[in-house]
Image (spheres, helix red, strand yellow):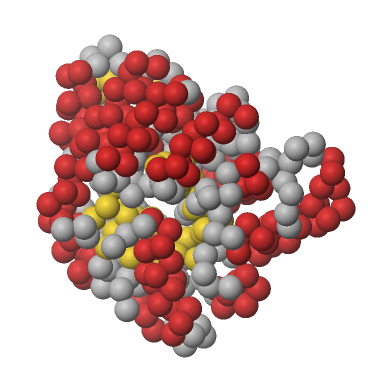
Amino acid sequence: MRIIDADAHVAESPSLAVEAMQRWPAHVTTSTDGRPRLRIEGRYYPEDHGPGAGVPVEHGLSTAAGLNCRSADGVLGDADRDHIDTMVLYPSLGLCTPTLEDPEFAAGFARLYNEWVADYCGPTDGRLRGVAVTPIEHGQVAIDIMREAKGLGLAATLLPPALKTRNLDHPDLDAFYAAAVDLEMPLGIHGVPGFHLPKIGVDRFTNYIQVHCVSFPFDQMTAMTALVSGGVFDRHPGLRVAFLEAGVGWVPFFIDRLHEHFEKRGDWIKGGWQRDPQEYVQAGNIWVTCEPEEPILPGVIEVLGADFIMFASDYPHWDGEWPESTKPLRTRADISDDARAKIGGLNAQRFYGLG
């Protein structure tokens, strides 16, 4: 069975930050408190105090013995130890890109990151595949950079769960979605607390662990509501979107909740969604990642099938299970071998268009 990690992360080397500071000294500086984090446009990344606090940067990575995430060769060795053949690498620091406010700087930083991650993954013979960032708040340039990222061989483009003043069904984003379909570029929705994205529900908490409990599922529910009920998949039926890092247990509940509202009050959203929400799963618009130890996984497969679920490790973050993240997938007896193969790698191969 080929195992593809559909949502791992790259721990960017200092070279990326150094290059950014050299290119944009007015925008990117080191922390003034002596901690290993950056100030970008005057904001700390991560911001680990106050409402919606992010993880303290010193505690973001797994403490498992032998973790070697600071180079591509180290990541490949860690992948071998965990029986992973291919890893799709979402950003860490690069998650800041959708929040950058200065248009010229945002475009430059996105291009720098995309070139950096393409170079990072290039020598690995396709085992590491980078995910692009783009300044989604800034219109046409976001499309141009996504197109360039496709040319760099990046596997998907990152999208935040919501923009600062707009949801993901805003008409201004239709040109971006149309371009993603034309490029056959899948979109991965990934939030992160403490990175100055909209605070969806987490504004009530200042403790990072409480924030972490709430932020990822609330983010993904917000994004799915916008894309489904806002008619985005109807306007762009070829669009492929993955809802990441919230597990899979929430999906049947939320699809059913959307179904009830579609059935009883769907006509209240003018120009909104045209089909039962479950049909977007069946049509290949909606994909999700799972943690393979989730006890509810067999029930999700029973209700919605196994064709839209992808394995994810969240490597090398503190809440992942490396070096045993694939063990439940490989050994649990309550899912079929057919479902195991789909979740383990076949679905991610289809979603990301991997060879």
**Front-most of 8 and 262?**
262
On screen, residue 226 versus residue 104, left or right, reads right
On screen, residue 217 versus residue 256, left or right, reads left
On screen, residue 209 versus residue 79, left or right, reads right
Q: Residue at x 79, y 36 (%)?
A: 270
Residue 218: give x, y in percent of width and height.
Answer: 61, 47
- Residue at the extreme right of the image, as rendered: 264
- Residue at the extreme front of the image, as rendered: 182
- Residue at the extreme top of the image, as rendered: 26
Q: Quadrant of residue 27?
A: top left
Confirm whether residue 210 shows in the render: no
Residue 211: give x, y in percent of width and height.
Answer: 54, 44
Examine the rendered structure and indicate whether residue 25 appears above or below residue 120: above
Examine the rendered structure and indicate whether residue 175 appears above or below residue 327: above
Residue 237: give x, y in percent of width and height.
Answer: 58, 49
- What quarter of the picture does the C terminus occupy? bottom left
On screen, residue 167 versus residue 94, left or right, reads right
Q: Residue at x 75, y 37 (%)?
A: 271
Residue 227: give x, y in percent of width and height.
Answer: 62, 44
**Front-most of 352 and 9?**
352
Q: Residue at x 27, y 68 (%)?
A: 84
Examine the rendered structure and indicate whether residue 64 appears above or below residue 156: below
Q: Quadrant of residue 101?
A: top left
- Residue at the extreme bottom of the image, as rendered: 333
- What quarter of the picture does the N terminus occupy? bottom left
Confirm whether residue 191 shows in the render: yes
Question: How many numbered markers are drawn?
Answer: 0
Q: Residue at x 43, y 58 (%)?
A: 351
